Each structure stands twice: as C-alpha cells, then as structure tokens.
Image (cartoon, rainbow, N blue to C red):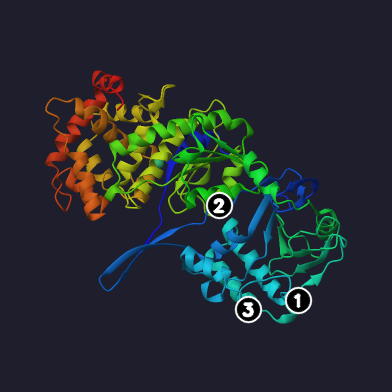
Amino acid sequence: MKIVRASIFPVAALLAVAALPTRALQPDAPRFMGEEALPAAGFVVPVMQGSAQTPAKPVEVVRYRCRLGDREWEEERSNADELWVSAQRLAAWTDRKGNRIAFARVLAELPLAYSGMDVTRETFERALQDPDNALDQTAEPERLALWARHFAATLRALEGGGTAGALQADGMAAEAATTADMQPETILVNLSRFAKILSVPLPDAAERAFLLRLNPHHPGHGRAPRDWFAFFVRFASAPRPGDRDADRSLRSDFLGNLRTTGWRDTEKAVREASARRLATGVREEDIPDDPLRRQARDSVALLDDWWYMESPGYILLSDDPAAERSADALLGALESLRPRFEALVPPFRGRHPETGVVRLFRKSEEFDRYFAAEGTPLGLSSTAGLFSGSRRELVIRPVRRNSALDTGSIIRHEAFHQYLFSAWGGVEAPIWFNEGTAELFAGYVPRANGTFEFRELERRAHVLESLARDRDADWTRILAVVLLWDQETFYNPPVAGADANWSYSIGYGVCQFLHRGAPLMRGRPWKHVLPTLLETLERTGNPRLATAEAFQMGRDGRDLSTLSRFADDLRDYWKSESARRGSRSGKVP
Ligand SMILES: [Zn+2]
C-alpha cells in the first residue's frame, strides 16, 4: 500500500489580494555576470544575471507495507531516478527569466531495471557502488551521453516541465536513438584547464548538456578529481531555429570562463563549519546524528548563500542572512512546543518523533520555484507554508511586511503536522482534527521564559461567532458532515458560500472547545471524546471510524443523538464571550 501525505495551510483569502504578479516569459537567453565559488566542489562557476541557487529537495519517501506469508513489515522506498540524481547533483541556479543551470558529478549509471522503480536506499547504494555501473575517466563517450540524457530527463521531471511518465518515455527514446544521434561533439574552449569538454545532443530544443574533465597537468590541478563533471542548461524558451547567439554565449561566457579553485582537503570542513550554527544554549553533544539531519546538511553543503542552525529536535535551513536571530528564537519555541504536542497528542506505539527539518526561504519566488514541479494541494499562491510527509520537511514562504500572518504562527501550525506525521508513523488523522489542532497550536504564542500564552485565532473565531449567531445554521448537520470529510473535500468544501477557511474554522472550533473549553465545564461531559478518537485510530488506522466512535455515531455514522448535544455545547461556547475568556486565560499546560 502506498501512502503519500502532504498537509497544507491555506491562506487563500489573505494571499489572494497579494497574489504574485504573473510575468509573461520573454524568450530571453541567459546573460552571465560575475561568478560564484563552490570550494567544496573545487569550481568557480560563471553565474547568470539575477540568478539564485536552488537547493536540492529531499528525496521523496514512500512507505510500503509488505507481507510475505505471516510476516509483515514496513519499508521506505524512493524513486530510483530521484535517488540517482540526488547522489550526483552538486548545485543549481535559476535566473528571473526562468533559465536554469545544474551542475553534477558523474558517478555511475543507474541500472535500466531500476529506472522508474521505487527502491530502498540500501538497494540503491549497492547499485551505485557496483563497479559495472561506475563511470570513471575511461568511460566511452556513448555511455556518458546516455548518462547525460537520462540525467537531463530526470531533472526535467523533478524540477518542472515534466512528469514521471514523461521520464519513462524519455528513457525509451534514449534507448531507441541511433548511435549517430547520440554522438557527443568535442568543444574547443578553455583548453588548458580542461582535458575534454563534450556537448551531448538532447531531444528537447531548449536543453543543453556538457560533460567535462579537468586537465591534471594544469597548474594547481595536481590533486584535482579525475572524474567527469556535467552542466545542464535549460533555456527559458528554445532559441529560434538558426539563432546561434545563445549557444555562442554559453560556450564563450560560460564554459570559456569556468575556473577551478585549488584542491585543499580542509576547505570543505572550513566551509561547512562557517555555514553551521547551534541554537542558543545547545551543546554539540545534544545534537543526535540521523539520516534526516545528514540529508538536510548535504542539501546546502555546496550552496554559498545557505546556512543552517541545529537544536536537539530540529534543523533549520535558510538563505536569509538576516534571519539568524529569528531562527534562534524559532528553534527555541519549537523545542518548547514539542513536549506540548506529545502531551496533547501522544505518539502511537511508543514511537520517537524524528528530527524536524525546517526550510525558510528569503524570497517568495524561491518558495514558488521550489514547488513549481509538483504544485501544492491548495494552489501555490495560496500556500504560506507546507509540510510534506513524503519529503519529511516543512517549508515556509517568507511573509510580506504588514501581512496579517506571522511566520511564527505558520511554523507552529506546520510543525504540528510534522510532529503528527512522525509520531503516528504516517497513520492518517481525521482532517478536521489534524488541521484544527494545528490551528490551536498556531495560537500558542511563546513568551521569553519558554512558556506560552494562548491566543484565539481571529481569522477563525469570527467565522465561528457569526455561525453561532446565525439562527438558520444547523450545527448538528454541519458537524455530521464536516467531521467525516476526507482531505480533498475539506479543502474544497461542496457547500454554497463556503471555502477552505470555513472548513478550517469548523475544525479549529471543535479542537479549541475540546482542549480548552470543555475541560472547564461542570462534570466534564466531553472528556471521553479525544481519548476514544486516538485509541480507535491507533487500533484501526481508520480516520472516519475513529471520528464516528468518538461521537458515538454508530458504525454507519447515522446516530446523531450524542453529536447533537455536543453541537449545542459547542455553539454555546462560541456564543459566550465569558466561556471563551475563561479558556484564553486558563493555564497553557
Ligand atoms: Zn495545515
């Protein structure tokens, strides 16, 4: 069974007014201006005017439940092509016009049998280490050309402009191509530094691929790697037939100006140390070592603009030089929140939540570019932050000045999704509960001493207040429907005049009441709801059944007697200023 989950945080109403301007893409070639050193790779690379580095996305993980006879186990697998690209990709840049350049080190071919398949990381590593697949300095040009075509097609699928299906079709096209089509051409530029530069023909007229190998006799290259390296260029639009200007510029301004740094072993360590920070009060020995953390560090190890900060439960990555102080405060708040997540919603079967990876972009455009290929469930322009369970990371769009949203509340919301995914091992929560509790935590405002003040979210509360005043609103019916919705329906409610904000408000209204209102009621009539919900979910993994049991709706969800009493109390709560004042001023555990 395949489980891929992604939860999102919609701000449709707020961001709609501030939607990004859509720029009509001019068929504009890249211009090169300045250069960027990648000391860890040993290269100094000419960069496109107005370009930014694109960090590598974590490889998507899919959890498989496997069964063989009586034996059952879980396995985490990833797309083999994606693992293969991620093992060899060194850096990438995109300019404002949409031109892209990627830089890679050629290590090995991916066995054809693995292409398009999901495999475990161990299986993939074995294939990568197999000498039969290795591509060293002696590799034939035809094998290198095949490698380059496969790499270009996989990049296209991962970075936008393609799908996994297109990827497979491309693999087949590469196989069917004649030897003549595949023949790489030697390019005669930068002859002293490079022993060889090859241009590989690609099926897409907007793409170029170059393979190059350093000249070991050039001064300073004595200890340089002998491997092949590769650059992939994708023009924002394909040059018009007969127009050679863009290609001429690539050869002279890009390949002609490629340089190398010296190769000193210490450089990588020095660079990594300068990119790394520890959150206040955290010592080196508090930081556990795990694959998620290592993958996160690796994703920015070669990127000049990126740095990261670590705390025992989290690693935060950013390209915003001004974010260091806020990052420190943020990690402090996340560390204090995690025990509160665990207290309110305990992990299933004694699981330990994994390291939380948080990525904070400096510019909104970078956030868009990062998700351009896969999109987001609510639409990119309406998404302020996103936790991807399959990629195990939480990504935040920078908030505009004067926005009604603040980064802290978005991160607290997403951090709950991240926690829940990890603590429940991917078991799907009822969506009203997942989003409602995430919104509850968005209102936990940190104080300097590590405690929290509880604030009601105005954007949700006013929906609930007006619904509570509306005499025609049938709260029992609303709950009977909304609480059983799946994710898709919750985000796009099939109710006249309702949008995602409406669904979120209902979920939030129920969760705030259960956690902060109902416990103050005489006799605590609703104290069984959450324990029943969690217990049923842990036992059955069925979110609808768990909700139905929690509100005693019967297996078919038709018995509404308990739910109708709950709806009355919930409505009274949202009508009563004094009840809510009590839950605001109450202690935050
Ligand atoms: Zn959410």
Of residues 205 and 175, the one drawn nearer to the viewer in this rendering: 175
Task: Specify the label residue 175 is tagged with.
Answer: 3
Rendered residue at 67%/59% (across/down): 104
Of residues 256 and 30, the one drawn nearer to the viewer in this rendering: 256
Above or below, 125 against 368 in this view is: below
Q: Position of residue 525 (x, y in %)?
A: 13, 32
- Mark 1 secondary-structure assignment: loop
Task: Tell which circle, 1 or 2, labels the residue nearer the N-terminal end.
Answer: 2
> What is the quadrant of residue 312 in the picture?
top left
The amino acid type, in three-letter code, at marker 3 is: Glu
- Mark 3 secondary-structure assignment: helix
The amino acid type, in three-letter code, at marker 2 is: Lys
Taking the image as drawn, is residue 208 in sight? no
Q: Label 3 CB, ligand 1: below 8 Å?
A: no
The amino acid type, in three-letter code, at marker 1 is: Gln
Q: Which residue is mark 1?
A: 183
Tag 1–tag 3 contact (CB < 8 Å)? no
Task: Specify the label residue 450 is tagged with.
Answer: none
Q: Quadrant of the C terminus?
A: top left
Of residues 33 and 342, the one drawn nearer to the viewer in this rendering: 342
Taking the image as drawn, is residue 489 in sight? yes
- Mark 2 secondary-structure assignment: loop
The span from disc 1 to disc 2 (Cα, nearest Å) is 32 Å
State the count of labels: 3
Task: Specify the label residue 57 is tagged with.
Answer: 2
